[in-house]
Amino acid sequence: MHIECGDHSDQGRVRTSNEDSRVANLQKKIFLVADGMGGHAAGEVASQIAASTIEEILSNTEPDSNPEELLQLAVQNANTRVYDAQVHEIEYRGMGSTLTLLVIRENRFYLAQVGDSRAYLLRNGILVQLTRDHSVVWQLYEDNLITKEDLSHHPRKNLITRSIGTHPQVEADIQSDDIHQNDVFLICSDGLTDVLSDQAIQNLLSSSGKSPQEICEMLVNTANAGGGPDNITVVVVRISPGA
């Protein structure tokens, strides 16, 4: 199994700063996107703390550790560090972050999710959203009160129901499954998905002859061409036959 990855981030066409953080650690097979919130640079601090804590913990654990327990532990540690910072520093009060984390161990992938950044899987030409948003509007969607197309422009779309650092404890959604040859994973902030439809994302991820890095840049550029109303961050991981 051969793994390739790419990553790209942009502040978009409207925001004056970028509060997203990402990790694309090919050696340790750790990939994540964190979208900070809080304003006045606090969101950027929250996402950076979350991302660096996750990478630190997952990079320094025994290879035979239980991956699902390890992901939950890493998420809780990230939550504690962000929460402590926002409680003890007035300028960081109320900050928090989303977190979407992909880890690959042998022939399986593991996902941890908090907030409304997303993970997708392109398999056999079909795009599937692996994560569910922790948000008010996603609950409305699951209750069949709005369509998926309504999510990006609903007046309550920014109300997330679970985040890193806003409470002393947090529970991540954890899932795992087998990896197939030619799988393509996408992790992204809502700056991408608020602009591009699932079909548009599928078309770009399916681009033949393009590297994961080139696909990342295409995704971000297309979101910016669509208005770029928010920070846009993407990580693409592709599995191909090989050693």
Image: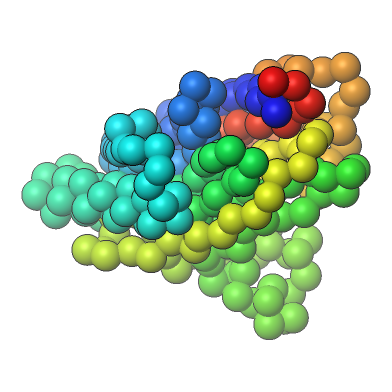
Toward the left, the furthest residue is: 88
Q: Quadrant of residue 208?
A: top right
Please give left or right for residue 202 compared with residue 42 in the image.
right
Q: Position of residue 26 (x, y in %)?
A: 53, 23
x 33%, y 64%: residue: 170
Colour setup of the view: rainbow
Q: Position of residue 112 (x, y in %)?
A: 49, 53
Please give left or right for residue 78 compared with residue 133 in the image.
left
Q: Is residue 230 visible?
A: no
Please give left or right for residue 79 compared with residue 85 in the image.
right
When the figure is inspected, residue 82 is found, relative to residue 29, above or below; the finding is: below
Please give left or right for residue 185 compared with residue 69 in the image.
right
x 50%, y 45%: residue: 101
x 49%, y 63%: residue: 173
Q: Is residue 100 visible?
A: yes
Q: Quadrant of residue 59?
A: top left
Identify the image quadrant of the C terminus.
Answer: top right
When the figure is inspected, residue 96 is found, relative to residue 49, above or below; the finding is: below
When the figure is inspected, residue 193 is found, relative to residue 76, above or below; the finding is: above
Q: Position of residue 21 (x, y in %)?
A: 44, 33
Q: Position of residue 220 (x, y in %)?
A: 68, 28
Q: Total of numbered circles in the picture?
A: 0
Identify the image quadrant of the N terminus.
Answer: top right
Q: Quadrant of residue 218?
A: top right
x 41%, y 52%: residue: 66
